[in-house]
């Protein structure tokens, strides 16, 4: 298929403008949602790049009073969110442009939620019916523009925010956090370095894979997950090797959105471990999932073997067994430069017991095919640190 044909306007799970050059529709998208003064929220690294300057300029030339906020960490904190709220209110803004990778998108969505609330951020943690506390009328409209192909936060109704005081990642959730309009423009991702392309691409794989393996019933999500895995198999190596390849970049940004759409069905042990490790060590979320992936797959083997074999057949693997699938994951990781163990990114097993306990308390643990104990999660963590598969 020619990449010129890789474009379209979709309405699942939200309204998506997909294709090369669609960033040119940003100002129109803001106006469609009634914005006159959007606040573009991104991370400091992106804020210094021409693509952000061009986006702000496009909005201003269209008569929009567009502001910029970028005081966000790689793992955004509650303080980052509230600083964004202060900037939103100081500039009399009336909508949010969530621009960037997972950190920028998550922070921006949380800011959009909080600008109209009088409760603390943590009151909206994704526990029980906390989401019903939200003053829905106060949630700002959101246009989301991802610049990485990993988290898929542009099609999600939640944000992962670090509670600095307690060193724990918390999921903030409300249905209105789902961006109303999304721009999927692969041209915004061509500048991603190979290492970031690999880590974020493996994050997209982890979302699709954990959604597939989740025991909950959601056949539509499961179907999306299987195809999302195939897209990663076919296009991630090319995107890492040749960042200018627009077809590979387009297919990966779609695989990312598919993963986040699919994990309505649930996540699992990879994320249950990655969240506490990210909070304790401030490590890259996608890289953590990439390294943890085979260890969690192996631990879940008894509960997932049949569906993994089915996926292996769909992928056309020569060895369409669980071991064949696991070997493909290991080979893919090696091909795109992912380390085999956590020690390679500076994580030891000194806090393994704490990580294990935190993993059982993470919301993602509920979607794992096997309900592991804290001790079992700690063991998986130690194996991943040492590279013992």
Image: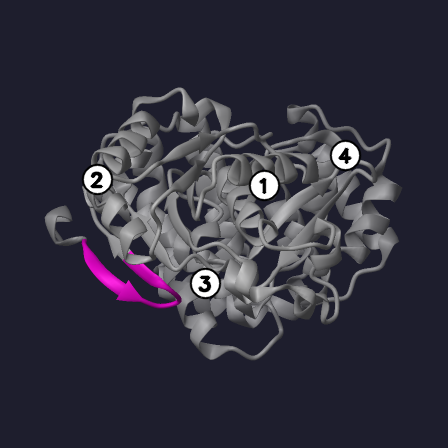
Alpha-carbon span between mark 4 and mark 3: 28 Å
Q: Residue at x 67, y 53 (%)?
A: 171
Mark drawn on residue 62: 2
Q: Which residue is mark 3?
A: 261
Query: As displayed, is residue 284 above or below residue 18?
Result: above
Q: Earlier in the sequence, mark 1 or mark 4?
A: 1
Q: Which residues are magenta?
A: 7-16
**Answer yes or no: do the residues labelled 1 and 4 have beta carbons within 8 Å?**
no
The percent position of residue 150, horizontal first and vertical second, equals 45, 44
Alpha-carbon span between mark 1 and mark 3: 27 Å
Alpha-carbon span between mark 2 and mark 4: 44 Å
Q: Is residue 37 visible?
A: yes
**Answer yes or no: do the residues labelled 4 and 3 have beta carbons within 8 Å?**
no
Q: Earlier in the sequence, mark 1 or mark 2?
A: 2
**Answer yes or no: do the residues labelled 2 and 3 have beta carbons within 8 Å?**
no
Q: Nearer the viewer, mark 2 or mark 4?
A: 2
Label 4 sits on a secondary structure element that is helix
Q: Which residue is mark 4?
A: 280
Q: Any magenta on residue 9?
A: yes
Q: Residue at x 55, y 70 (%)?
A: 265
Nearest the camera: 234 or 164? Answer: 164
Q: Earlier in the sequence, mark 1 or mark 3?
A: 1
Q: Earlier in the sequence, mark 2 or mark 4?
A: 2
Nearest the camera: 124 or 279? Answer: 124
């Amino acid at each position: 298929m020619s990449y010129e044909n890789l474009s379209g306007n979709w309405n699942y799970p939200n309204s998506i403008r997909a294709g090369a050059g669609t960033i040119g529709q940003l100002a129109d998208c803001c106006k469609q949602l009634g914005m006159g003064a959007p606040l573009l929220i991104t991370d400091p690294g992106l804020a210094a790049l021409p693509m952000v300057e061009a986006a702000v300029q496009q909005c201003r030339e269209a008569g929009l009073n567009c502001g910029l906020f970028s005081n966000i960490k790689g793992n955004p904190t509650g303080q980052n969110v509230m600083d964004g709220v202060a900037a939103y209110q100081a500039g009399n803004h009336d909508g949010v442009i969530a621009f960037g990778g997972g950190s920028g998108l998550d922070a921006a969505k949380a800011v959009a939620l909080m600008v109209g609330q009088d409760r603390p951020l943590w009151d909206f943690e994704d526990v029980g019916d906390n989401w019903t506390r939200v003053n829905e009328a106060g949630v700002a409209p959101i246009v989301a523009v991802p610049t990485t192909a990993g988290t898929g936060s542009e099609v999600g109704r939640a944000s992962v925010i670090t509670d600095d005081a307690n060193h724990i990642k918390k999921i903030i959730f409300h249905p209105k956090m789902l961006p109303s309009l999304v721009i999927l423009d692969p041209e915004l991702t061509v500048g991603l370095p190979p290492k970031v392309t690999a880590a974020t691409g493996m994050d997209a794989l982890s979302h699709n894979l954990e959604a597939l393996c989740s025991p909950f019933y959601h056949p539509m999500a499961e179907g999306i997950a299987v195809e999302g895995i195939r897209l990663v198999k076919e296009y991630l190596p090319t995107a890492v090797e040749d960042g200018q390849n627009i077809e590979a970049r387009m297919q990966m940004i779609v695989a990312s959105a598919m993963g986040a759409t699919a994990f309505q069905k649930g996540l699992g042990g990879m994320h249950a471990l990655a969240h506490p490790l990210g909070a304790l060590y401030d490590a890259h979320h996608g890289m953590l999932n990439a390294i943890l992936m085979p260890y969690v797959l192996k631990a879940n083997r008894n509960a997932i073997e049949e569906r993994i074999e089915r996926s292996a057949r769909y992928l056309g693997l020569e060895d369409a067994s669980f071991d064949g699938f696991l070997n493909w994951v290991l080979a893919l990781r090696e091909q795109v430069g992912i380390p085999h163990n956590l020690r390679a990114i500076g994580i030891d097993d000194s806090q393994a017991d704490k990580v294990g306990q935190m993993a059982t308390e993470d919301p993602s643990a509920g979607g794992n095919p096997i309900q592991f104990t804290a001790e079992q999660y700690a063991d998986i963590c130690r194996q991943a640190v040492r590279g013992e598969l």
